[in-house]
Amino acid sequence: MTLRIVLKYAVPALLGAGLLAQAAPAQAQATKLKFSTMESPNDPFVACFTMPLLNELKAASGGRIDFETYMGGTAFAHPLKQYEQVARGVMDISQGVLSYTPGQFALTEVVTMPFLVDDARAASVAVNKLAPKHLADEFKDIHLMAVLVTPPLYVHMRGDARSLDDLKGKRVRATGIGATNLLKGLGVTPVAMPAPAVYENLQKGVVDGALAEFTALQAFRIGEVTKTHLLANASSALLFIGMNKDRLAALPKDIQDAVRTKFSGPAVGERAAMCWQKLGQQVADKLKAEGHTFVAFTPADRAKVAPVAKSVTDEYIAGLEAKGKKARDFYDALQKEMSLVGKPAGN
């Protein structure tokens, strides 16, 4: 074989191998999606719900996407900026609290009306089933993966509290329209603040108590500075998890389809609620073992407070109706859907 023949076949082969070697790393490199939340990486809810969901999305992509996470303690973890960050594209996916910005999600906050939610799982399934019809305008800036409804917010006090009457004149941290207006109607001063600020304000006596679901007592150390827990389900808090629309549209179509189906909707909301319920029971059991006082909210207590709760609900819905929002339709549909949600398998 002559040198000319060798070069004729060998040079193109070597050049091709070199180009493939250069292209392989680029093809293997995953698209990085930025994710933010106010919770810390060690938060039990993050470990139960958030990170497994993101890891499953990564796996579903075949490794074509990966995540950079910005959590509690980082510059992008501000409790009030999660929705804004994902809407503007500062973050690609965010998980945040809707109840911290009263009025911005006014129709969605119908879910926070007093004593409406007894079962967070049923409420989460219902609100996410109804969201495309009733809430699309409030989430038009993002792709809404799910509204996350917490278990009931109970009253956690530094001192004793045997009934809601004992809260009169007290300052209690509240979140959400429903809880805030209920406390006002009961002669309590509601104080708005994000969960990470509650521990310090309770410790210093700035507030006498706080409304929170049980997992927050561990995640934000509220259980260290409270000793009495009044089990009055005054309201629920609302979170969201969502994705930037442009970022979603730029992903390969099969990944877009996965985000819109498997990783969005009622099943995602249900999954979050079941994490909260499981983790919350563990926290409650631990506090009981440590000697904390748990006070039942009796049917008589509820009947006594019912007129105030109804007034809060009716006034809020009427106010939204006056602004052209179909709040009564949403409230009624929500109640109906919650009643239709069955128990999970094995219960």
Image (spheres, grey):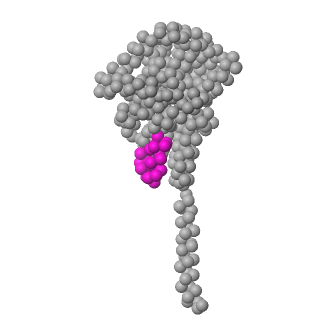
Q: Give percent across and percent down for residue 164.
A: 52, 11
Q: Looking at the picture, does residue 77 appear above or below residue 185? A: below
Instruction: Give the residue at x 54% y 53%.
Output: 62
89 or 258: which is nearer to us? Answer: 258
| Quarter placement of the C terminus | top right
Q: Nearer the viewer, residue 135 or 174?
A: 135
Q: Residue at x 45, y 38 (%)?
A: 265
* Image coordinates for residue 122, horizontal then vertical, percent: 48, 28
Query: Secondary structure of the magenta portion, mostly?
Result: helix
Residue 198 forms part of the magenta stretch = no
The residue closer to the viewer here, 211 or 341, is 341
Whether residue 171 is situated above or below residue 256 in the rendered picture: above
Location of the N terminus (image quadrant):
bottom right
Asked if one can make out residue 320 in the rendered structure from this viewpoint, the answer is no
Look at 45% across and 18% down and name the residue there.
114
Image location (x, y in percent) of residue 33: 51, 48
Above-or-below relation of 33 to 44:
below
Residue situated furthest bottom in the rendering: 2
In the foreground, 181 or 65: 65
Q: Which residues fall within the magenta stretch?
A: 242-264
Residue 136 shows in the view: yes
